[in-house]
Image (spheres, rainbow, N blue to C red):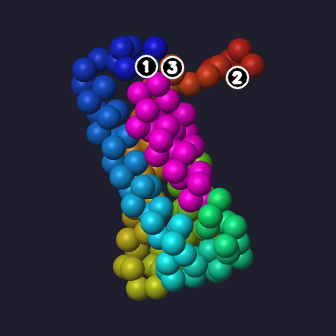
Amino acid sequence: MPDTALTRPALITSWLCQLTAAAILGQTLFFKFTGAPESRYIFATLGVEPWGRIGTGVLELVAVALLLFPRTPALGAVLAMGLMGGAILSHLTKLGIEVQGDHGLLFTLALVTLVAAGIVALLRRRELPVVGGHF
């Protein structure tokens, strides 16, 4: 059951992490959906411009909604972790830590989002659907 199964400190921690992850993911949506030059550069470097940029933006928007809706933060956290895992892997393999002189800001934001989402997923793991009877 969402929220009610968590202790007060766990609930507060979860919501702080949910808001952190949602805020970081949410602020990047403008750049992805408007085709900002930085965003176009990143996805062109990865070879998936424009559909990778737009698709990633849609998935990030879904993750934000799931993180903020009281019944689905665990699902949003898992989705955010997957997205940030892909972002971090992209930085480590093709983009580099620093992208267009950002001093590693995008990489750091991806790490912060991954950690925040990981905490939410851990705290709310009992809210995740059971797959195949095991979890």
Q: Which residue is mark 2?
A: 131
Q: Identify whether 2 is placed above or below 81.
A: above
Amino acid type, label 2: Val
Which residue is the extreme one toward the bottom? 101
Magenta residues, as a range?
Answer: 56-79
Q: Which labelled disc corresponds to residue 2? A: 1
Disc 2, SS: loop
Which quadrant would residue 44 be assigned to in this image? bottom right
Q: Position of residue 135 (x, y in %)?
A: 63, 20
Apparent side of residue 20 relative to residue 89 in the rendered image (left or right):
left
N-term-proximal mark, 2 vs 1: 1
Query: Which mark is nearer the camera, 2 or 1?
Result: 1
Q: Which residue is mark 3?
A: 126
State the separation of the CA atoms marked 3 and 2.
12 Å
Residue 105 in view in this figure: yes
Which quadrant would residue 27 be assigned to in this image? bottom left
Q: Position of residue 82 (x, y in %)?
A: 59, 48
Mark 2 crowdedness (10 Å alpha carbons): few <14, some 14-19, many ≥20: few
Which residue is the extreme one toward the front? 34
Residue at image x 54%, y 75%? 35
Q: Position of residue 88 (x, y in %)?
A: 54, 62
Q: In this rendered view, identify the residue nearer to me: 2 or 105.
A: 2
Residue 122 in view in this figure: no
Q: Is residue 69 magenta?
A: yes
Disc 1, SS: loop
Disc 3, SS: helix
State the separation of the CA atoms marked 1 and 3.
9 Å
